Amino acid sequence: MTRAWKVRVGDREVSALHEPATSDERLGTFVCAHGAGGNMHDRGVQAVAKELRGRGLDVVRFNFPYSEKKSGRPDPMPVLRATIEAVMAEVEHEGPLLIGGRSMGGRAASMMAADHVQADGLLLLAYPLHPAGKPEQLRDAHLPSITMPTLCINGTRDSLCRPDLMEAVLPRLGKNFQMHWIEGADHSFHVLKSSGRTDADVLGEIGAATVSWLASMAPR
């Protein structure tokens, strides 16, 4: 059953939405944070949520305080982290609890994972390894501290994650960290028409990669 509610973060409230999986299989719950330029209702977040729900995941979407008040300036990292933690604390779930999300939201969740927050897995969608046009400013210092199972999905045309730079980081990460590259996709997971693929194809690849990763996490 879909649940919409308000979550208190300090002296503010943000909107949250828990939508159940639409398949018969129930694989867990994904607390999905949005990116810097979006919100819980933006097209990219909704598209990924729909795909993952169809694959057996409940998905929890929510706003950060700045997006709740329709500001374009993201909150400081401590506020982003506190928001994710507040939402997690109010989520009822069966099976694995995953945290993560798109770009900035995923980065905030990854910093929580590096500090060993209580969750079963980390799903990063378009991880922003560096600011656009500033590949020398890597956001990788905390990644080796992540011990929970992690799946990071990025496109090979992502302007915030040069593949060669990420590939250089991967040897420093544990075997728990899995990288999945989507050929020809940009930071929004869009592909060129000349690729012969569609955005729907890319979403399907994201869904399939996520299900495969979850299966690898299951006890044998």
Image (cartoon, rainbow, N blue to C red):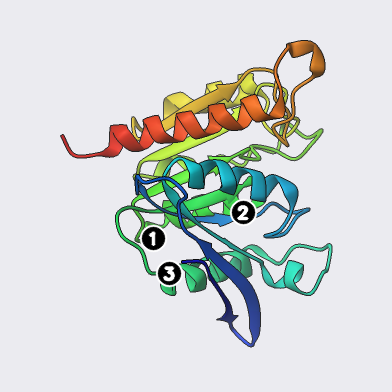
Q: Nearer the viewer, mark 2 or mark 1?
A: 2
Q: Earlier in the sequence, mark 1 or mark 3?
A: 3
Quadrant for residue 7, please give it: bottom right
Q: Residue at x 57, y 23 (%)?
A: 181
Q: Is residue 35 left or right of residue 180?
A: right
Q: Which mark is residue 117?
A: 1
Q: Position of residue 127 (x, y in %)?
A: 61, 39
Inter-mark Cα distance, 1 to 3: 15 Å
* Residue at the spot 70% in from the left edge and 45% down from the top edge: 44
How far separated are the C-alphas under marks 2 and 3?
17 Å
Residue 73, can we see it? yes
Q: How many marks?
A: 3
Q: Which residue is drawn at the image coordinates 75% and 40% (left, top)?
A: 131
Q: Position of residue 132 (x, y in %)?
A: 79, 36
Residue sitting nearer the eye, 203 or 33: 203
Asked if residue 65 is positioned above or below residue 218 in the image, the reply reads below
The vertical placement of 201 against 39, above or below, is above
Q: Is residue 186 left or right of residue 4?
A: right
Tell me the number on the disc at residue 207.
none
Amino acid residing under circle 1: Val
Q: Which residue is mark 3?
A: 91
Marks 2 and 1 in Cβ contact (< 8 Å): no
Amino acid type of the residue tagged 3 in the rendering: Val
Q: Secondary structure at mark 2?
A: helix
Mark 3: few/some/many CA within 10 Å (<14, 14-19, 20+) = some
Q: Position of residue 105 (x, y in %)?
A: 62, 54
Q: Residues within 10 Å of mark 1 (few under 14, many from 20)?
A: some
